[in-house]
Amino acid sequence: MKTDDLIDLLAQDSAVPWKIGRILGYATVVGTVIAGTVFFIGIGFRPDIASAMETVRFLFKFVVTLSLAIAAIGALLRMARPGARLGLWGWAFAAAPVLLGGAVIAELIVMPESTWVARLVGHNARFCLTLIPLLAIGPLACLLLALRQGAPSRPGLAGAVAGLAASGIAATFYAANCNDDSPLYVMTWYPIATAMVVFVGYLAGTKFLKW
Amino acid sequence: MRAAISGDSAAYHRFLKAVTPHLRAMACRRCDRFGAPRSEAEDVVQEVLLAIHTKRGTWDPNRPIGPWISTIVRNKLIDALRRRGRHVSVPIENVIDFLEAEEQTDPLEARDVERMLGRLKEPQCDIVRSISVDGHSIRETANRLRMTEGAVRVALHRALKALAAMYRSELRENG
């Protein structure tokens, strides 16, 4: 086939394409709805949610998880486009770890040393490690499907960042159920659960996001 | 491209026409550097055109198009050369035969798409040939195949996506 013939052919298929930004936006919304549905049907809020809402530690968990989700989704919007730079979104990834690190230091200063280990181990580590990945399945699948319409230069990395975004969404729901609020607990268990999702995202990315 | 992305077929045609010589120059340069025969450059050009087409929703009209295109070209060139890795390292006698044979064909004619067209299902294959090789319009093709114009458009769109996917799967098989 001659190249000019191919150009004629392509020009005939000139329907307005879906914009990748919009696709990723929908994927985020649908993924969040799926995770939310699973959460409210299967797990639900912790019983003392009303009094928990008044504590700084409880609310701070959402600051961390939401900043992770927002940074990762913002980065995905750039990574799905060929030739777009990460720019400030690269720095936004630092927000969640820095915030959490600051909170851990504050916790260590405020709380007596004898309570540190108990706070770190918590009561729900097993749930944390199973429920976050479980809640992340829906958002991760939606984001990966959306990214297939994109053109990430580094498919594995894009998949891993999709895993981060999915963990951020999942952890936001999970945090509303978990009654371990100490930053020491969050710093220990949430990243392990996140790492599992990121690893799955990376593998899926190398397999499904090549274009 | 701005007009093209909002569905203006003629503008899209002009854009693709204008960008192809640049793609060809880039592809030739890369082929030379990696020791691949020039004749393969045209296959790469066509693969890049297909990628530009299927991924045009990832271009943000508020940004310059240059970096977008060159990133796609780089990505596709690497794929294409990797896929041809075996062909490139054949003994020199074969290469000479190959080059001599090549001179008889139109230098702007590529064979990869042709080969993959054969793997498309009907009526996709028929539609693609009718529009590209025979130069019919969508309406003429629809009349001949007794399909609606909308159905032909959908089939064409699917066919182009399938072609782009075939390039990918070949890479995986050989890679």
Image (spheres, rainbow, N blue to C red):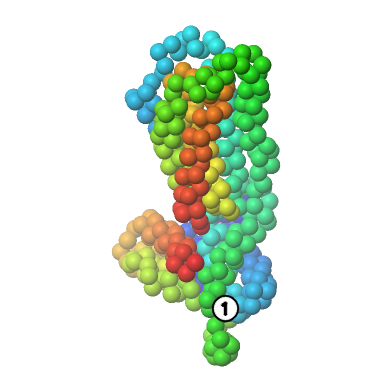
Q: Where is residue A107, by image quadrant?
A: top right
Q: Where is residue B150, by image quadrant?
A: bottom left
- Picture coordinates of residue B73 (x, y %)? 61, 62
In this picture, residue A197 sits left or right of residue A84: left
Q: From the viewer's perspective, is residue A142 above or below residue B170?
A: above
Q: Secondary structure at mark 1?
A: helix
Q: Which residue is at a point 37% across and 23% down the rendered structure image? A: A43
- Chain for numbered disc 1: B
Q: Is residue A76 visible?
A: yes
State the residue in front, A74 or A44.
A44
Residue of label 1:
B88
Q: From the viewer's perspective, is residue B111 above or below residue A85?
A: below
- Picture coordinates of residue A104 (x, y %)? 62, 23
Q: Which residue is at a point 53% across and 19% down the rendered structure image? A: A119
State the residue in front, A188 or B105.
A188
State the residue in front, B165 or A156.
A156
